[in-house]
Image (cartoon, helix red, strand yellow):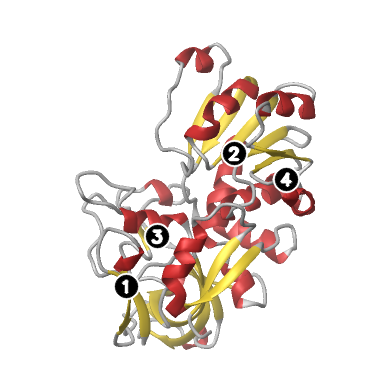
Amino acid sequence: MKAVQVTGYGDIDRLEMADLPIPEPKEHEVLVKVEACAINNTEIWMREGAYGTGGKSGWRPEGVQFPRIPGSDITGKVVQAGSNVDETMVGRNVVLFPFTSSGKEGEEHISEDMSFIGSEYDGGYAEYVVWPAELCYDMPLDDYTDSCVFSVSGMTAWHMVEQIAPQPGETVMVTGSNGGVGSLNVQIAAHVFGAKVIAIVGDTALEAQMKELGATHVLSYKSDNLAQEILEANDGPIDAVLDVVGDALFSTSLHVLKKGGKFCTSGSAGGQKTELDFRSLYLKHITLYGSVLGTRDEFKQMLAAISEGKIKPVLDRTFSLAEAREAQSYFKKSGKLGKIVLLPNK
């Protein structure tokens, strides 16, 4: 099979096309013919070494074992079942839950042995992948590309909104609203939880599209008076922030939160370190949440909401497997709306 491997920590030249044997499923696994694999920050930061220290990076402390096939947002067709898997699995169109864990129900994502596909296991930048049968779910939509854009971004967004638990009518600010996680944060907060959403983007030319996703107001982080514009749009302080940007909007977020407000972070594309005046937290009784991925139950809730049309796929562009380097470079550019997807059979 054709596959793209990461050969070590570094730039996009570490992504190399390879001819590899098709993997054999173990007794509890299935072989999936990959039809679509969306790109996430996680495989780029894994390659760049952003998750680790001391030269090691990955979801586990020992770092990634190279070469590794990246890619975690995977849809495809089951073409072979392991010896202990019901043969009725063969032929099913599936979306893959992206990690294994021995954690108890509701705590799978915080288990010490959580291991991620595309980091600790070979992932979806390939024509085939093997994965535990119990972690393969029926696709929520008929289209492979539409269904693949939710796995990691959608579960991350769902868990973030669950953390802050907005009540109907409360106001939630979403940073990075035009990105993979942000565009889903907007939809989930608005259409599942009934919140009012202030979407923060770079270019307000995206205003119409963001309002179609459920945003009430759309503002640009490039404004010199962003904090004031947020307070004016909401007629006062806001209830919660869903953030994937990090340092660039952190002080603004704390400033516009009400007393008792909630701030949930799951990314730091705009800076991984920040300055914090602790008085901002305790005098305003602000609660901070760190959030990444989510639980299997949340994944199933998300798939149901997608099937019901409450959450829609937002797709920016597709690339072929051979264009993986170009795709990751394009992913890092600003101004996109939605997900970037690799199509192994394109």
Q: Which residue is mark 1?
A: 5
Dot 3 corresponds to which residue?
A: 43
Q: Identify the residue under disc 4.
A: 204
| Label 1: how many Cα within 10 Å (few below 14, some 14–19, many 20+) | many
Amino acid on which disc 3 is placed: Glu
Mark 1 to mark 4: distance in Å?
Answer: 37 Å
Disc 2 designates what residue? 242
- The answer to whether 288 appears left or right of 336 in the picture is left
Q: Are marks 2 and 1 in contact (CB under 8 Å)?
A: no
At x 79% / y 52%, what residue is drawn? 208
Between the residue at mark 3 and the residue at mark 4, the CA separation in whole angstroms equals 29 Å
The percent position of residue 214, horizontal first and vertical second, equals 76, 48
Instruction: Check disc 2: other Cα within 10 Å, few if <14, some if 14-19, many if 20+.
Output: many
Residue 6 is situated, as x and y percent measured from the top left of the image, at 30, 68
SS under mark 1: strand
**Front in this rendered view, residue 164 or 344:** 344
What kind of element bears circle 4? helix
Residue 69, quarter of the rendered image: bottom left
Camera-side mark, 3 or 4: 4
Instruction: Report, in whole angstroms, how far the alpha carbon at label 2 lies from the one at label 1.
Output: 33 Å
Residue 102 placement (x, y as % from top left): 34, 56
